[in-house]
Image: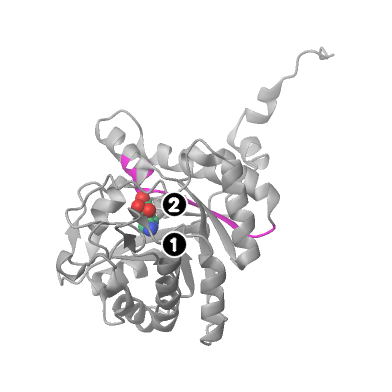
Amino acid sequence: MESTSFKRFRRLRANPSIRELVQEHFLLAQNLVLPIFVHEERESIDIPHLPGHRRLSISDAISHASDCLLLGIKSFALFPVVPPGSKDASGSQALNSDSIIYRALRAFRSGLPEALLIADVALDPYTTHGHDGIWDSRMRDVDNDATVAVLEKMAILLAQAGAHFVAPSDMMDGRIRAIRAALDHSGYSHTGIISYAAKYASCYYGPFRQAIGAGIAGVTTIDKRTYQLNPANSREAVLECIQDAAEGADILMIKPAGHYLDVIKEVKSRTMLPVAAYQVSGEYSAICAAAEKGWLDKNQAALESLISIRRAGADFIFTYFAKDVAILLRA
Ligand code: PBG
């Protein structure tokens, strides 16, 4: 007889078969989104702070994505690297449909029709100051409504170039409603919106800012606290998500992921919409750096970090580990 104050939990951990039988959460390649950086050059170049990732030419990007499709990754988030000479204070190249992101989307749609394409909506790749919107020098802040007016146009151009989903990552107020209306009025009611609904003002975006060459000198410490969320708050994140759902978002995203598992869980319990999480560049690079020093096992850390994000409630995950993990999952 077993004592009532003592349970042998280890019976369910005794061997791989029983451990697998009672496993609650799973990681599948189909639930991963791979971020891809495209630039104007013909040669692809390494991104030092994001090991294993490169600024790709359009044709290299397509062959990279095509390898990933064979591994079961079907979705790609495309990000443009804009040459410093094409940037200005208002990010005007964001509306130039000949610029790199639009060319890349068109090339992906014709060269790789099976790929699901997600395009960021924000001005930071295009502005000299690296902010996500139009800078008002008198207010010394990003101008919300002037920015939203540009983002609406940008979303239409991205849909026109072939994005299946636009993903506003700017954190301006009212942009989901405005973008939904703009898409609907322009014949893109089938184009979806993945809202970066709860995006925190995080230092973990550093390597990404280096990857896209944010600002003019690749500055990684841009202060975005007047629009991105305070890491000390969670109720505010839930409010943002409820609001974006009401404004017409199809999918809500929490970002970063690993340090915000409580927020993922809370949002998941309060919405019936799919919930995504973005394991951001710094989360990836921190694991890679520790692994390089021999302090962590990179594969195990990648798998553990991602299953934790699934366990918290994310339906799918944007991650720089997507390809590595898809390979591990096949083995
Ligand atoms: C820009 C944007 C950022 C990321 C995605 N879109 C950076 C930022 O807000 O400064 C970060 C992604 C990452 O770190 O991997 N709007």
Q: Nearest to the eye among marks 1 and 2: give it.
A: 1
Residue 13 location in percent, x, y? Answer: 63, 29
Residue 97 location in percent, x, y? Answer: 31, 82
One can see residue 25 in this view: no
In the image, what residue occupies the spot 76% across and 14% down? 6
Q: Is residue 289 left or right of residue 3?
A: left
Whether the residues at callouts 1 and 2 have beta carbons within 8 Å, the answer is yes
Q: Is residue 244 left or right of residue 53?
A: right
In the image, what residue occupies the spot 31% across and 28% down? 295
Number of numbered discs overlaid on the protein picture: 2
Mark 2 packing: few (<14 Cα in 10 Å), some, or many (20+)? some
Q: CA distance from mark 1 to mark 2?
A: 9 Å
User: Residue 36 — which label?
Assistant: none
Which residue is at the front of the view, 256 or 140? 140
Taking 158 as reference, is 193 above or below it?
A: above
Quadrant where the N terminus lies? Answer: top right
Residue 274 location in percent, x, y? Answer: 62, 59
Q: Is residue 109 magenta?
A: no
Q: What are the residue bounds of the magenta stretch?
A: 272-285
- Type of colouring: one colour
Which residue is at the front of the view, 108 or 200? 200
Residue type highlighted by circle 1: Asn
Residue type highlighted by circle 2: Tyr
Q: Is residue 295 left or right of residue 84?
A: right
In the image, what residue occupies the spot 53% across and 44% down? 309
Residue on which the image places disc 1: 144
Residue on which the image places disc 2: 227
Q: Is residue 190 left or right of residue 304?
A: right
Secondary structure of residue under mark 1: helix
